[in-house]
Image (cartoon, helix red, strand yellow):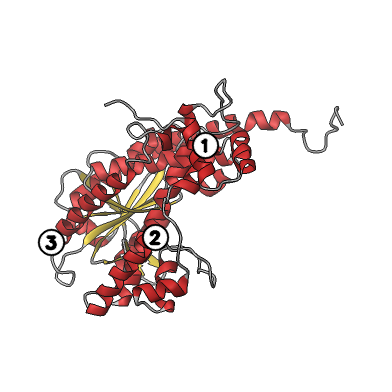
């Protein structure tokens, strides 16, 4: 299949047809933000014809319910008389109104679903914009005729090679596959009250706060991206599911205790072997959880989080229930920790888990060596800056 590109000149014509002032177009070409300007003006492709009152009349939903749904999707409240809704918006609102009025779904469920949709779409949109702008720094290259080079606009101009035109179908198919997987998980798990529960795990980078104070934002972002890629690769490959990333921490669920143990140990090993990453510490607990709006709550989650907080770098700490479930597993061994009093939980006897046959001394040696490597790497990063800055208390010869 050949790439059907939209010529750069035609894109400029479209921007002008949408009433974008020439000054904005010229400034975007100078700033290297023409792709962003095109997305901002052309991505929706719908005329905004209705204000809040007209949308209420057209859908049968009271204005306060429309406001609530709009806020749940992550958008600010519409101002009086502001035309921000299209025919597509009104069609969606009308369909939601029919569901609510028929009793199929309650308003509370509606708001919950729109919150999930809004937050998920906001993350996807931000990631796409980051991808578009990563290599768009500086003025846009121009053709001999003074038009922007076509390759600069490839993410939005190409119907075959660019990713923005194909994204709606990608999102739809991804949603179908995740819906199927979520239903399968719930079927296999059974009713929540009768279920044996799942394994909840947290893994976070050790020393991230200190690192954030000593490196640039770009270096810190690179560390977070590296950790996120590693976490997704290891957890998904091991049969787990990433619930969410919280900067330097990942939360995951695993249905099978043995798979959970392998994931936790693999996370520890992978971070230890990864250049530029500090060690991770992992905490896990097994038991019943509450799943709402794509997130997970409950005592089991709290216990896993507290276990992570007291784990040493490069180690895996597990709850008593998870240790009991893994006692007969030949792949792992345990060392009991002294009982700890955990906030809002009480006194708990946690255990450090390691691979069977791997002596604790080997783990300690590996952790110590890893710490030395990280200290050396950090000194190397900071040394050039220190050389460029006048030493404290010393006269600057160029002053």
Q: Does 284 sit above or below residue 138?
A: below
Residue shown at 44%/35% (left/top)?
Answer: 370
**Residue 170: quadrant of the picture:** top left
**Secondary structure under the numbered disc 2 in the rendered image:** helix
Q: Considering depth in this image, is 332 or 299 the residue closer to the camera?
A: 299
In three-dimensional space, the C-alpha distance between marks 1 and 3, rounded to whole angstroms, equals 52 Å
Which residue position is annotated with label 3?
Answer: 187
**Residue 361 seen in this snapshot:** no
The earlier-in-sequence mark between 3 and 2 is 2
- Of label 1 and label 3, which has the lower sequence position? 1
Dots 2, 1 in contact, CB < 8 A: no
Q: Nearer the viewer, residue 282 or 372?
A: 282
Q: Is residue 252 visible?
A: yes
Badge 2: residue crowd in 10 Å (few <14, some 14–19, many ≥20): some
Disc 3 residue crowd, few under 14, some 14–19, many 20+, Cα 10 Å: few
Q: Residue at 32%, 76% (x, y): give it.
A: 107
Residue that badge 1 annotates: 12
> In the picture, residue 368 is in which quadrant?
top left
Q: Nearer the viewer, mark 1 or mark 3?
A: 1
Q: Is residue 107 above or below residue 203?
A: below
Position of residue 160 measured from the top left corner of the image (x, y, whole percent): 32, 32
Q: Which mark is residue 116?
A: none
| Quarter of the image where one finds residue 230 | top left
Residue picked out by circle 2: 118
Tell me where residue 317 appears, x and y as whole percent.
33, 53
For image coordinates 35% across by 30% down, the residue present is 4
């Amino acid at each position: 299949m050949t790439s059907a590109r939209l010529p750069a000149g035609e894109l400029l014509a479209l921007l002008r047809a949408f009433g974008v002032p020439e000054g904005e177009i010229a400034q975007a070409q100078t700033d290297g933000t023409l792709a962003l300007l095109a997305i901002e003006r052309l991505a929706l492709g719908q005329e905004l014809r209705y204000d809040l009152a007209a949308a209420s009349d057209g859908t049968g939903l009271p204005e306060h319910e429309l406001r609530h749904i709009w806020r749940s999707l992550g958008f600010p409240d519409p101002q009086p008389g502001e035309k921000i809704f299209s025919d597509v918006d009104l069609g969606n609102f009308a369909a939601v109104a029919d569901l609510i009025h028929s009793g199929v779904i309650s308003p509370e469920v509606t708001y919950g679903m729109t919150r999930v949709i809004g937050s998920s779409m906001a993350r996807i949109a931000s990631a796409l914009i980051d991808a578009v702008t990563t290599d768009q720094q500086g003025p846009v290259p121009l053709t001999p005729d003074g038009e922007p080079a076509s390759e600069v606009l490839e993410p939005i101009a190409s119907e075959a090679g660019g990713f923005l035109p194909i994204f709606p179908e990608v999102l739809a198919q991804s949603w179908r596959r995740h819906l199927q997987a979520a239903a399968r998980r719930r079927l296999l798990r059974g009713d929540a009250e009768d279920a044996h529960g799942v394994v909840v795990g947290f893994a976070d980078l050790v020393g991230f706060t200190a690192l954030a104070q000593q490196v640039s934002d770009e270096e810190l972002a690179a560390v977070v991206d590296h950790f996120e890629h590693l976490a997704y690769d290891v957890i998904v490959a091991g049969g787990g599911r990433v619930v969410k990333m919280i900067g330097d921490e990942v939360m995951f669920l695993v249905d099978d205790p043995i798979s959970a143990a392998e994931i936790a140990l693999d996370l520890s090993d992978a971070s230890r072997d990864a250049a530029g990453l500090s060690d991770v510490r992992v905490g896990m607990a097994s038991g019943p959880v509450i799943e709402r709006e794509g997130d997970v709550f409950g005592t089991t989650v709290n216990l896993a989080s507290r276990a992570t907080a007291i784990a040493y770098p490069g180690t895996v700490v597990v709850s008593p229930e998870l240790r009991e479930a893994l006692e007969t597993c030949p792949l792992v061994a345990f060392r009991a920790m002294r009982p700890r009093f955990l906030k809002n939980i009480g006194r708990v006897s946690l255990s450090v888990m390691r691979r069977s046959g791997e002596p604790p001394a080997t783990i300690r040696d590996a952790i110590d060596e890893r710490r030395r490597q990280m200290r050396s790497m950090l000194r190397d990063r900071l040394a050039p800056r220190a050389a460029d800055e006048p030493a404290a208390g010393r006269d600057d010869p160029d002053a």
